[in-house]
Amino acid sequence: MSRFCTSQKSVAVDTVGNIANCTPVNFRDFAGAIVTVPAGSSITALTWYHCREENGTYQALYDPAGVALTPSTVGAGKDYAIAAEIFPAAFIKIVGDAAGTVHLTLKT
């Protein structure tokens, strides 16, 4: 029988110009997550940023082809599995095209 643990967290999302307002998420002990965009949210795009330190300078994450890790579309009231390229990150921030809150379900 395998054992796993989940953690749920509400995360503040803001635009790239206000990345300091985004909630840093300690991702070091996790290897997967679902992001939920709440019903009624005006967020339609998310970009993932990472840093080795919680209070350091966050950089956008890219896939091997050099494309920013952005879901093609996000919509209110929907759940999205995060890309596997995010799994090695130590700390992440989620930047949106609008300010708001998303919910993460993190899995070890």
Image (cartoon, rainbow, N blue to C red):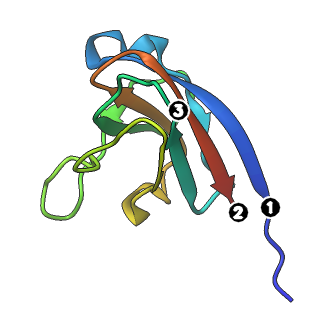
**Up/down of 78 relative to 2, above or below:** above
Q: Which amino acid does label 2 sit on?
A: Thr
> What residue lies at 54% left-to-right and 32% top-to-bottom?
53
Query: Mark 2 touching mark 3, by CB under 8 A?
Result: no
The type of residue carrying mark 3 is: Pro
Considering the numbered disc 3 on the image, is that residue within a helix, a strand or a loop?
loop
Q: In this view, does 23 lie above or below 44?
A: above
Sequence-wise, the earlier of marks 3 and 1 is: 1
Using a 10 Å C-alpha cutoff, classify the residue at mark 2 as few (fewer than 14 neighbours), some (14 to 19) or many (20 or more): some
* Residue at the extreme bottom of the image, as rendered: 1
**Counting residues from the N terminus, which is met first, the one under dot 2 or under dot 1?**
1
In three-dimensional space, the C-alpha distance between marks 2 and 3, rounded to whole angstroms, equals 23 Å
Mark 3 or mark 1: which is in front? 3
Quarter of the image with the N terminus is bottom right
Q: Is residue 100 depicted above or below 33 in this figure?
A: above
* CB contact under 8 Å: marks 2 and 1: yes
Considering the image in quadrants, where does the C terminus appear?
A: bottom right
Q: Out of 7 and 27, give the one closest to the viewer.
A: 7
Q: Distance between the residues labelled 2 and 1?
A: 5 Å
Q: Which of marks 2 and 3 is nearer the N terminus?
A: 3
- For disc 3, the marked residue is 38
Of residues 43 and 48, the one drawn nearer to the viewer in this rendering: 43
Q: At which x and y percent is residue 67?
A: 15, 52
Badge 1 amino acid: Cys
Task: Using the image, tell me which numbered label, if any, was put on residue 108.
Answer: 2
- Give the camera-side residue of 59 and 19: 19
Which mark's residue is nearer the viewer, 2 or 3? 3
Residue bearing mark 1: 5
